[in-house]
Image (spheres, grey):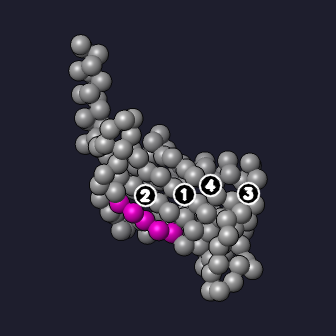
């Protein structure tokens, strides 16, 4: 019984801090090697800390390489659509900083020009994990 109380006391504290549940999904028009994916993963893990209360310890990432993307009616250049979902409220100033970091990461690692990268943010109030919702 004490374990149960301890577990849910910490769980409630965690929920108040909102230090969890960011998800970044990247649709990328080019192939991505394992080394490139690992580099992006590591750098996004650091970059997510730009949003107060978010950390790599709860970050989930998705990669969709060789995704068919068209921008300005063409698919001739490398491009990416990066979607960032966070549990909690919006933070426009942090999102602005994170957009710059995401564009730098994808440009450095994959050679995708920042003007060929869209970044979409979604603050989510209902998020499920481990069989229940927060």
Residue 46, how many percent across, how many down? 53, 50
| Label 4, label 2: how far apart the Cα atoms are | 14 Å
**In the depicted view, which residue is nearer to us: 41 or 120?**
120
As measured in the structure, the alpha-carbon distance from the residue carrying label 2 to the one carrying label 1 is: 8 Å
Q: Residues within 10 Å of mark 3 (few under 14, many from 20)?
A: some
**What kind of element bears circle 2?**
strand
Of labels 3 and 2, earlier in sequence is 3
Residues in magenta?
Answer: 119-123
Q: From mark 4 to mark 1, how far is it between C-alphas?
A: 6 Å
Distance from the alpha carbon under mark 3 to that under mark 1: 14 Å
Quarter that holds the N terminus: top left
Task: Left or right? Give the position of 7 relative to 72.
Answer: left
Do tag 3 and tag 1 residues touch (Cβ < 8 Å)? no
In primary-sequence order, the first of circles 4 and 1 is: 1
Of 9 and 133, which appears nearest the observer? Answer: 133
The residue sitting at 62% across, 81% down in the picture is 71
Q: Name which residue lies at 57% across and 68% down.
A: 81
Query: Main SS type for the magenta part?
Result: strand
Question: Which of the two discs, 4 and 2, labels the residue nearer the N terminus?
Answer: 4
Query: Disc 2, disc 1: CB below 8 Å?
Result: yes
Contact between labelled residues 4 and 3, with CB atoms less than 8 Å apart: yes
Residue 125: x %, y % from top left: 29, 55
SS for callout 3? loop
Residue 85 is marked as: 2
Give the residue pinned by disc 3.
32
Instruction: Check residue 63 in the rendering and tell me which mark sits there, or answer none.
Output: 4
Residue on which disc 1 sits = 25
């Amino acid at each position: 019984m004490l374990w149960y109380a301890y577990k849910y006391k910490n769980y409630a504290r965690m929920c108040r801090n909102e230090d969890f549940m960011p998800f970044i999904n990247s649709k990328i028009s080019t192939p991505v090697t394992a080394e490139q994916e690992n580099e992006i993963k590591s750098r996004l893990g650091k970059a997510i800390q730009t949003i107060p209360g978010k950390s790599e310890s709860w970050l989930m990432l998705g990669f969709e390489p060789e995704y068919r993307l068209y921008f300005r009616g063409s698919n001739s250049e490398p491009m990416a659509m990066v979607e960032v979902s966070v549990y909690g409220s919006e933070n426009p100033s942090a999102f602005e900083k994170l957009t710059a970091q995401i564009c730098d990461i994808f440009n450095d690692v994959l050679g995708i020009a920042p003007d060929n990268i869209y970044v979409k943010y979604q603050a989510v109030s209902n998020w499920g994990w481990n069989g229940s919702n927060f």
